Image: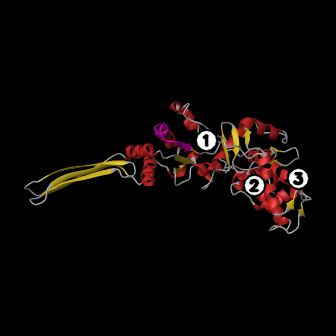
C-alpha cells in the first residue's frame, strides 16, 4: 500500500511474482503495458503507372520513430512485403529507459527459485536508468539479490517494521472518538495494542468486537464511558475461537510419519503430546513476538516439559511445519516460515489463536503410518 501510493499502477509497471515463469513473461508484460511493438514491416512495389517506393518505420510509440521513403518510377509491376522482428527484451529495455517507467515486482518471494537469479540479473541491467522496487515478506526477502555480488551497493533495503504500540493505540483512539466513546487513559486501547502483534488489522478486529459486544454500532448521542471487559482473557478467547486459521489443524497434526513413530513428550503437568504439540505449546507461551530463534523456542519448551526435545529436534519439526505452511498457503503468504534458524510468524491471527484460542494438544501416535 505504501509503494502503490507513491507509484500508482497507472504510472508504473506492476508485476506479481506469482505470474512470472520466465524472463519472457517480464518483457511481454512491458510490451503490453507500454503498447509497444517488436516487429518492423516494409513494402516495396512498382507498376507501370505509379511510382515505386520503399517505406519503413522503426521505433517505440510515444518515444520516437524514424520513417524513410525511397521512390522512383519503373516499368515493371511487383510488390514485396518484408518484415523483421526484434528481440522483445531489447525493445522492452529501450522503452523502459526512454520513458523512465518505474518497475514494481510485488510478492518477489513468489518468483520461482529457478527464475530468481535470472530476474535479478535482468533487473541489474535496468537499475542504472530505471527505478525498480521489489516487495517481499521479511523471512526470505532478498537473499538471492544479496547473493549476486554485482548487486552489492546497488540495493537499498527499506524494512517495513511492525506497527508500534503508539501507532496501534492511535487506531483505537481515533475510532472510539468518532463513536463518542471515552477510554480513560487509553486503558482499553493499550491492552488491545499489546496483544495485536504489531498488526493493524488485528487491532481493528479487537476494537470492532469490543464495540459490537458493547452494543455500539454507530456514533452515540451521549458520551459512553468504556471499561475493560471483566474477563479480558475470555474476551480474547472468544475472538480467537471465531477466527481459526485454516492451516492450524495441519500444523497440529504434523506430517504423516514413516517408519519409527514419534516420541511422546511429557509436560510437567503430566499430559503427553508429540514434538509438534510441544512446538505449538512453546509458541503459545512466547508472547507477542514475530521473529523467534530456534534456541529461544527450545528453552521455552524445556521449561514446561520433563524430557524436552533437543534444539535439533525442534529445528527439524519447524522445518516440516514450514513445508506444511508453504504447501497450504493458497493465494496468500504462508502463515509461518522457518529460515536460517529463525521462525517468522507471518500470520498474526495464528499467533493470536495459539495464545488465546481453545485447542487441544495432539496425542502422540502409537504406531507409524
Residue positioned most to the right? 230
- Residue 358 inside the magenta-drawn segment: no
> Mark 3 or mark 1: which comes first in sequence?
1
Disc 3: which residue: 187
Secondary structure at badge 2 equals: helix
User: What's drawn in magenta, residue-wise?
Assistant: 121-133
Relative depth, front residue between 192 and 300: 192
> Mark 2 or mark 3: which comes first in sequence?
3
Q: Residue at x 87, y 47 (%)?
A: 270
Residue 127: image location, x then y, percent: 50, 38
Q: Residue at x 88, y 67 (%)?
A: 222
Disc 2: which residue: 202
Relative depth, front residue between 282 and 117: 117
Residue 363: image location, x then y, percent: 78, 52
Q: Is 82 placed left or right of 207 in the picture?
A: left
Number of the label disc, if any, that sits on residue 171: none
Secondary structure at badge 1 equals: loop
Q: Is 123 placed left or right of 167 in the picture?
A: left
Residue 305, by quadrant, is top right
Number of the label disc, if any, that sits on residue 141: 1
Q: CA distance from mark 2 to mark 3?
A: 17 Å
Residue positioned most to the left? 75
Amino acid at each position: 500500500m505504501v509503494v502503490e501510493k507513491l507509484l500508482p499502477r497507472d504510472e508504473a509497471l506492476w508485476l506479481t511474482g506469482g505470474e512470472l515463469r520466465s524472463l519472457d513473461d517480464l518483457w511481454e508484460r512491458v510490451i503490453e503495458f507500454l503498447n509497444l511493438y517488436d516487429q518492423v514491416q516494409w513494402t516495396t512495389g512498382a507498376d507501370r503507372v505509379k511510382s515505386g517506393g520503399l517505406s519503413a518505420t522503426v521505433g517505440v510509440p510515444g518515444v520516437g520513430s524514424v520513417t524513410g521513403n525511397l521512390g522512383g518510377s519503373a516499368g515493371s509491376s511487383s510488390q514485396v512485403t518484408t518484415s523483421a522482428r526484434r528481440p522483445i527484451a531489447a525493445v522492452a529495455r529501450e522503452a523502459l529507459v526512454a520513458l523512465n517507467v518505474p518497475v514494481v515486482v510485488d510478492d518477489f518471494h513468489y518468483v520461482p527459485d529457478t527464475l530468481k537469479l535470472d530476474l535479478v540479473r535482468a533487473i541489474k541491467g535496468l537499475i542504472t536508468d530505471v527505478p525498480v522496487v521489489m516487495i517481499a515478506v521479511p523471512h526470505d526477502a532478498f537473499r538471492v539479490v544479496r547473493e549476486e555480488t554485482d548487486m552489492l551497493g546497488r540495493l537499498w533495503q527499506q524494512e517495513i517494521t511492525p506497527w508500534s504500540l503508539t501507532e496501534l493505540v492511535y487506531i483505537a483512539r481515533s475510532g472510539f472518538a468518532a463513536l463518542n466513546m471515552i477510554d480513560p487513559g487509553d486503558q482499553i486501547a493499550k491492552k488491545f495494542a499489546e496483544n495485536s502483534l504489531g498488526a493493524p488489522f488485528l487491532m481493528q478486529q479487537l476494537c470492532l468486537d469490543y464495540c459490537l459486544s458493547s452494543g455500539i454500532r454507530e456514533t452515540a448521542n451521549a458520551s459512553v464511558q468504556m471499561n475493560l471487559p471483566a474477563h479480558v482473557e475470555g474476551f480474547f478467547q472468544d475472538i480467537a475461537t471465531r477466527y481459526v486459521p485454516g492451516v492450524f489443524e495441519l500444523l497440529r497434526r504434523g506430517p504423516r510419519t514413516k517408519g519409527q513413530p514419534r516420541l511422546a513428550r511429557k509436560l510437567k503437568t503430566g499430559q503427553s503430546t508429540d514434538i509438534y504439540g510441544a512446538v505449538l505449546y512453546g509458541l503459545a507461551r512466547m508472547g507477542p513476538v514475530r521473529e523467534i530463534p530456534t534456541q529461544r523456542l527450545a528453552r521455552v519448551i524445556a521449561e514446561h516439559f520433563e524430557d524436552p526435545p533437543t534444539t535439533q529436534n525442534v529445528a527439524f519439526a519447524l522445518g516440516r511445519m514450514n513445508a506444511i505452511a508453504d504447501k497450504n498457503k493458497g493465494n496468500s503468504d504462508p502463515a509461518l516460515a522457518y529460515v536460517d534458524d529463525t521462525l517468522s510468524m507471518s500470520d498474526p491471527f495464528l499467533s493470536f489463536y495459539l495464545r488465546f484460542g481453545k485447542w487441544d494438544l495432539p496425542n502422540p501416535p502409537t504406531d507409524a503410518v
